[in-house]
Image: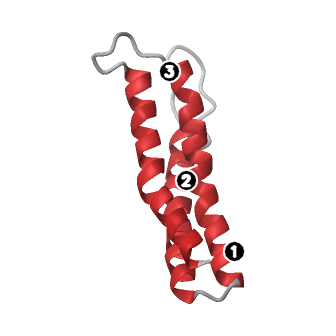
Amino acid sequence: MSALLAVGAVTWLVVVPLMFVQGALTAGGMGLGPGDPAAASGTFRWASWLGAGIPVAGVVVSATTRRWGWTWFYGSVVVVVAVVAAVRWAQTHPGPPPPPPPEPAHCVERSGGDSDCP
C-alpha cells in the first residue's frame, strides 16, 4: 500500500505540474504558432482534478490503512490545495460593490433656490 501512496505522491509532485506547464504552453503558443486556449482547457481541467483528487484520495487511503506519515503528507497537501483554491476563487469572484456614500446628516445650503436650512 505504501508503494501506491508513493506513486500518488510522485504523480502529484511531477505529473500534475507538468500538465499545467503543458497547458500554459498550449494556451500561449510560446513560439509554436498562435496559442489555443480552448485546446489547453482540457489539460488544465485534468490537472486541476488530479491536483485536488490525488491528495484527498491519499488522505483517505493512508488514514484507513494507518500509515500516519503518509497521512501527514497528504493532509498537508490538502491544506496547500485548499489555500490555492481559495485564493483562485477570491481572484475570480469579486466582492460586493461598495455601499453608496452616506447622505449628509446636517443641513447643507444649496445655491440656486430656496433652502430648508434654518
Disc nearer the start of the sequence (3/2): 3
Is residue 103 among what the camera can see?
no
Q: Nearer the viewer, residue 15 or 93?
A: 15
Q: Nearer the viewer, residue 10 or 85?
A: 10
Looking at the picture, does residue 25 appear above or below residue 50?
above
* Residue sitting at x 41%, y 16%: 35
Q: Quadrant of the C terminus?
A: top right
Question: Which residue is rendered at x = 27% and y = 16% of the image?
Answer: 31
- Residue occupying image coordinates x 65% and y 89%: 66
- Which residue does the numbered mark 1 point to in the structure image? 60
Which numbered marker is on residue 37? Answer: 3
In the image, which is nearer the foreground, mark 1 or mark 3?
A: 1
Outermost residue toward the left in this view: 31
Mark 3 in CB contact with mark 2 (< 8 angstroms): no
Question: Sequence-wise, which precedes: disc 1 or disc 3?
Answer: 3
Label 2 crowd (10 A; few <14 / some 14-19 / many >=20)? many
Residue 89 x, y percent position in the rendering: 57, 47
Give the Cα distance between marks 1 and 3. Answer: 34 Å
Q: Could you tell me the amino acid type at mark 3?
A: Pro
Report the side of 27 relative to 68 (left or right): left
Is residue 11 visible in the rendered image? The answer is yes
Where on the picture, by quarter, is residue 41? Answer: top right
The Cα atoms of the two marked residues, 3 and 2, are separated by 20 Å
In the picture of the structure, the residue carrying the numbered disc 2 is 51
Q: Mark 1: which amino acid?
A: Val
Q: Residue 88: horizontal and vertical position, in percent?
A: 52, 47
Q: Which of disc 2 and disc 1 is earlier in sequence?
A: 2
Check the picture and name the quadrant holding the N terminus.
Answer: bottom right
The residues bearing labels 1 and 2 have C-alpha atoms spaced at a distance of: 15 Å
Reply above or below: 70 against 16.
below
